[in-house]
Image (cartoon, helix red, strand yellow):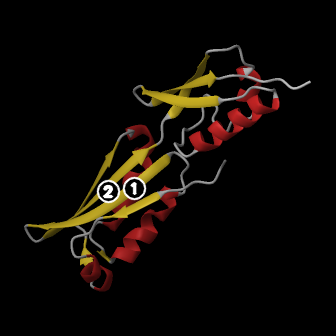
Amino acid sequence: SSDLILIFSYLLYSTSLLAMNPVVINYVNIDCNNDEICNGFKSMTETLIGKEVTQNLIKNKIDFILNDNRISRMSFKIIKRDKKNYLYLKVTTKYKISKIEHESNKKIPFDNILSYLPVKEGEYFDQLDLVECKNIIKKQLNDKGYGEIKITFKLEKEKEAIELKVFVYIGKTIKLK
């Protein structure tokens, strides 16, 4: 599922004014939860320092960042203080999946099902994939004759990774001959 849905949240002081009237950026600051990923973005955004910019120019300049599959969301705001304009960027990166485990009240072929899921160990986690995971697990188990399936997830965040735990509850199963 390489469809990425990125959330844009643009917080600007006087959005309509900035959209029409350019301002000169004096300082750029990036707040990011993963410095390793965001270091490359810093040099790119620093090219805005000393230049007249509009909201659209800033958006165009940083749009390529949002195409990076490691980025979950990004927002920016410009604050005017002491006759200087500060561009603040907030970048939230996705976590890598370090481990996928499951628990079930009955023995199920989870290792076989795992290969069908859009989440993989070592890849970046996208919360939206959980809906697809739930549907795939249910379908795979229904196809094998299991009924009354309830699936829940637990996410445990580590430093820059996430552990995904899948809980599968199997209710009454009726096998037709």
User: Quarter of the image holding residue 134?
Assistant: top right
Badge 1 density bin: few <14, some 14–19, many ≥20, Cα 10 Å: many
Snapshot quadrant of residue 171: top right
Seen in the picture, residue 63 relative to 129 is either above or below; the reply is: below
Q: Residue drawn 39% across and 46% down?
A: 92
Disc 2 crowd rating (10 Å Cα; few below 14, some 14-19, many 20+) is many
> Which residue, given by chain and number where applicable, does mark 2 sit on?
89
Please state the total of marks drawn on the protein image. Answer: 2
Q: In this picture, is 34 found above or below 107?
A: below
Q: Which circle, 1 or 2, is nearer the viewer?
A: 1
Image location (x, y in percent) of residue 59: 41, 69
Q: Nearer the viewer, residue 81 or 169?
A: 169
Q: Are marks 1 and 2 in contact (CB under 8 Å)?
A: yes
Residue lying at 59% horizontally and 20% vertically, measured from the top left: 101
Does residue 115 appear anywhere in the picture? no
- Percent of width and height locating residue 123: 60, 35
- Most distant residue in the bottom direction: 20
Q: Residue at x 74, y 36 (%)?
A: 139
Give the secondary structure at mark 2: strand
What's the mark number on residue 63?
A: none
User: Residue 70: where, in percent of width, then height?
Assistant: 51, 45
Question: Looking at the picture, which amino acid does disc 1 mark?
Answer: Met
Asked if residue 106 is positioned above or below residue 75 in the image, the reply reads above
Q: Which residue is mark 1?
A: 74
Q: CA distance from mark 1 to mark 2?
A: 7 Å
Residue drawn at 10 percent across, 71 percent down: 83
